[in-house]
């Protein structure tokens, strides 16, 4: 499929946002989360679900094709917003479109554009990824400080010039480290996929400055910056990248590593989201 089913990205995002706000019975959301491999349990800890809509029933979305990814868009009333504070709401975009699905880059960016149209000010992007540093074993959460887009694509169209300096908010990274001071940070490289990277490609990414490799996040972050969202990116290292370890890569093992780390990283993410809600 191509981008032809989203002929106007702005209008499509507004239509989807209206559906989600109406389903939750609220006029806006505050924080959006994209929960990648291993991160799905966090939603249960962040707050009470007040609405849940199947992705296929929301304009521009479709059911995920990847094992380990959800198929609904959920609104949560955030638990920890401080005594007497106004209620705040998070939307969990459990229907991430990956670039390798060949639905077009508009479809990849549709979720974060919908979040902005729904009123969100902050976006938390998570993923499962391969690590280039041996000291970051499977199960290590890593803050994304910057990215390298190796997809040869952009979600921006025409003469749209967007500054990507501090794309991944230094303020939000500091906030996350106030929850866990040991959180490392690194540069994430997005490849197109769906095949895993070769050892030579991983080596190239390392020469370019990457610490992490995966198949998501960068294109979404660019679209989110254009839409005015403040972005926190967190990767879960689910495996050492090809060539870093002698072991062959297997998607089922990636899913298993994410499940093993799930309870710990979910608690971490819930605490981070709660602190964002209190401070913003």
Image (cartoon, rainbow, N blue to C red):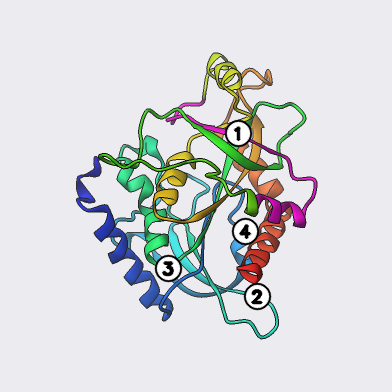
Q: Which element carries disc 1, helix, strand or loop?
A: strand
Residue 81 is marked as 2
Marked residue nearer the N-terminal end (2 or 4): 4
- Residue at x 47% of width, y 45% of height: 221
Instruction: Name the mark nearer the viewer: 2 or 4.
Output: 2
In the rendered image, the quadrant that contains the C terminus is bottom right
**Mark-to-mark CA distance, 3 and 4:** 24 Å
Name the residue nearer the viewer: 93 or 40.
93
Q: Are marks 2 and 4 in contact (CB under 8 Å)?
A: no
Tag 4, which secondary structure?
Answer: loop
Can you give x and y, in whole percent of width and height, for residue 46 in the image?
A: 63, 67
Give the residue number, with chain letter if any, for mark 1. Answer: 187
| Gap in angstroms between the C-alphas marked 4 and 1 | 25 Å
Residue 146: x and y in percent read 57, 37
Q: Could you give the CA–CA distance between mark 2 and mark 4, rounded to whole angstroms?
A: 20 Å
Q: Residue at x 46, y 65 (%)?
A: 120
Please provide percent x and percent y for residue 56: 33, 59
* Real-space CA distance between mark 1 and mark 3, rounded to the nearest whole angstrom: 28 Å
Q: Which residue carries the number 3 mark? A: 119
| Residue 45 appearing in the image | no
**Range covered by the magenta-colored residues:** 173-196
> Above or below — where is 13 with respect to 102?
below
Q: Quadrant of residue 116?
A: bottom left
Residue 211 in sight from this viewpoint: yes
């Amino acid at each position: 499929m191509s981008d032809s089913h989203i002929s106007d990205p702005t209008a499509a995002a507004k239509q989807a946002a209206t559906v989600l706000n109406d389903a939750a019975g609220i006029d806006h959301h505050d924080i959006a989360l994209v929960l990648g491999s291993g991160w799905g349990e966090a939603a249960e800890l962040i707050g009470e679900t007040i609405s849940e809509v199947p992705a296929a029933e929301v304009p521009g979305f479709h059911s995920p094709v990847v094992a380990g990814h959800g198929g609904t868009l959920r609104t949560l009333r955030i638990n920890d917003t401080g005594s007497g504070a106004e209620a705040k709401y998070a939307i969990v975009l459990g229907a991430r479109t990956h670039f390798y699905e060949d639905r077009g880059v508009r479809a990849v960016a549709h979720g974060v554009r919908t979040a902005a149209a729904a009123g969100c000010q902050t976006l938390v992007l998570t993923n499962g990824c391969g690590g280039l540093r041996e000291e970051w074993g499977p199960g290590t959460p890593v803050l994304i400080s910057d990215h390298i887009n190796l997809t040869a694509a952009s979600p921006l169209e025409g003469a749209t010039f967007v500054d990507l300096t501090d794309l991944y908010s230094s303020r939000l990274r500091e906030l996350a480290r106030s929850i866990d001071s040991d959180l490392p940070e690194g540069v994430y490289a997005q490849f197109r996929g769906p095949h895993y990277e070769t050892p030579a490609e991983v080596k190239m990414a390392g020469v370019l400055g990457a610490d992490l490799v995966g198949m998501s996040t960068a294109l979404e972050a660019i679209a989110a910056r254009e839409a005015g969202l403040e972005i926190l990116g967190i990767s879960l290292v689910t495996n050492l990248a090809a060539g870093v370890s002698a072991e062959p890569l297997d998607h089922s093992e990636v899913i298993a590593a994410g499940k093993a780390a799930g309870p710990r990283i979910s608690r971490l993410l819930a605490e981070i989201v709660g602190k964002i809600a209190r401070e913003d």
